[in-house]
């Protein structure tokens, strides 16, 4: 894969530098960019600025996802070629997951203009809100709400760890919570979506280095999140005999170990990355434990079996389990994937992923969707250690530019479907 021009690289690097300090935690080098916070606001302003710099028409949909258009997507419904990703992060996340796709998308616009390319279809750059669900618990809330996969009433009622609901956070940000909801008008503009993303495993690092800087995404594993509540009784840490205790922490620890064992048994993965103990005193036995479970795997039935076993374990301990989100197996659009292969070459690797993406939500909603992955030499992600070589990021821009050039050159070269039904 070649490199873009020095001017495009310069602009890419400038945008990268702009984003570097936003929400960065000096002590870890990780990012805290959560929905409807000051950092989120700064990132939205940055996106708007980039749109204005390029003379793109900026709109926000009913959920607050930002869309910057080159050309009028309402003149030719279903024809818009959309690229982009998200700018929010997990707690102490890396710099690349999300921002790489947004910065690359603007750099693609620059590269196309530099080449004097005149698109036959409208081109859009999108910034999806709340992809990680770090604050309100449901991943891809931005794309789920506009596609109807997440009911607006449920979204408004989601609460963060301090009990602030999404509705309250929207109001605090000066927005009307009742505006959020399914947005068919926005979706009608999207003919196809190609999300460029940092690779989140290390499959590409083991392949031929000459041909594996960028891969084409084929599918996303089924995955979901569950909340498990376990009962206990608060009591004194010094005076309560071990046999008299009802310790919610012990039940939580048993559940964490059971999650590992059931994942191994069913060939899935299961993670408890967040738990809360109440009342949270060092010298008080926990009266309540909340355990958040994330489970994924290549086969949907195996993920369901993992969670079913953990539901039994939960019930045996007097607890409850509630599904917070579920995303079925996603296969990206076969026509679009083969078009990307034709454009980039058969030697470009194909890659499935265990990570969730807005691309998956749009694909499930019927939008022809595909992804490009930029090699990650260590495979580490959702961590300050997440990394991609600068040259590989630039190669990603070059690949996405070629893809968009092909997709936007004449309506005749669009994939089979023409937008969501
Ligand atoms: C998002 O990155 C996820 O896979 O949870
Ligand atoms: Mn992520
Ligand atoms: Mn992401």
Image (cartoon, grey):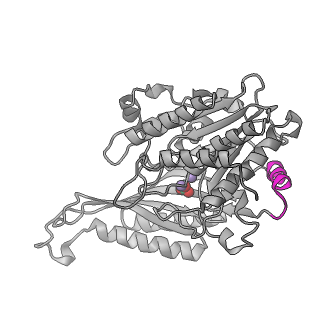
- Based on the displayed image, in which of its 4 quarters is residue 295 positioned? bottom right
Q: Which residues are magenta?
A: 334-347
- Direction top: furthest residue: 75
Residue 191 magenta: no
Q: Is residue 75 above or below residue 299?
A: above
Rendering coords of residue 135 (x, y %):
41, 47
Which residue is more in the foreground, 14 or 131?
A: 14
- Based on the displayed image, in which of its 4 quarters is residue 163 positioned? top left
Quadrant where the image shows the C terminus = top right
- Direction front: furthest residue: 6
Q: Is residue 129 left or right of residue 245?
A: right
Q: Is residue 67 above or below residue 333?
A: above
Rendering coords of residue 296 (x, y %):
58, 63
| Residue 51 appears in the picture as rendered | yes
Rendering coords of residue 201 (x, y %):
60, 67
Query: Principal SS element in the magenta part?
Result: helix
Which residue is more in the foreground, 240 or 209?
A: 209
Residue at 38 percent across and 29 percent down: it is 171
Residue at 21 percent across and 77 percent down: it is 243
Q: Is residue 414 left or right of residue 34?
A: right
| Residue 64 appears in the picture as rendered | no
């Amino acid at each position: 894969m070649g490199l873009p021009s020095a001017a495009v690289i310069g602009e890419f690097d400038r945008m990268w530098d702009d984003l570097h300090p936003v929400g960065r935690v000096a002590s870890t080098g990780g990012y805290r960019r959560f929905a409807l916070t000051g950092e989120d606001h700064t990132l939205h302003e940055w996106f708007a600025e980039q749109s204005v710099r390029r003379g793109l028409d900026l709109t926000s949909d009913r959920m607050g996802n930002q869309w910057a258009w080159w050309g009028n997507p309402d003149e030719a419904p279903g024809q818009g070629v959309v690229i982009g990703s998200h700018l929010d992060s997990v707690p102490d996340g890396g710099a690349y997951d999300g921002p790489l796709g947004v910065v690359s998308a603007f750099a693609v616009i620059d590269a196309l203009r530099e080449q004097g390319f005149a698109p036959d279809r409208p081109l859009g750059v999108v910034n999806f809100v709340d992809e990680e669900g770090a604050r309100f618990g449901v991943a891809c809330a931005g794309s789920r709400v506009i596609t109807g996969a997440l009911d607006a009433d449920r979204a408004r009622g989601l609460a963060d760890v301090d009990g602030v609901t999404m509705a309250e956070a929207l109001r605090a940000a000066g927005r009307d919570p009742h505006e959020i909801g399914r947005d068919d008008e926005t979706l009608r503009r999207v003919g196809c979506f190609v999300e460029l993303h940092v690779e989140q495993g290390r499959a590409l690092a083991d392949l031929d280095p000459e041909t594996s800087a960028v891969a084409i995404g084929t599918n996303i594993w089924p995955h979901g999140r569950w909340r498990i509540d376990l009962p206990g009784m608060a009591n004194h840490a010094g005076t309560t005999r071990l046999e008299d205790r009802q310790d919610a922490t012990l039940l939580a620890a048993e559940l964490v170990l059971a999650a590992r064992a059931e994942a191994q048994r069913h060939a899935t993965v299961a993670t408890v990355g967040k738990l809360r103990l109440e009342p949270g005193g060092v010298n008080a036995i926990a009266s309540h434990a909340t355990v958040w479970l994330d489970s994924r795997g290549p086969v949907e039935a195996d993920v369901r079996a993992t969670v079913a076993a953990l539901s039994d374990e939960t019930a045996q301990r007097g607890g409850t389990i509630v599904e917070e989100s579920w995303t079925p197996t996603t296969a990206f659009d076969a026509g679009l994937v083969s078009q990307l292969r034709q454009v980039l070459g058969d030697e470009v690797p194909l890659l499935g992923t265990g990570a969730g993406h807005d691309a998956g939500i749009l694909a499930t909603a019927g939008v022809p969707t595909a992804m490009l992955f930029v090699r990650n030499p260590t495979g580490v992600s959702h961590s300050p250690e997440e990394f991609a070589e600068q040259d590989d990021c630039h190669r990603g821009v070059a690949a996405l530019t070629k893809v968009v050039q092909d997709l936007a050159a004449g309506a005749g070269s669009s994939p089979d479907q023409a937008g969501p039904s």
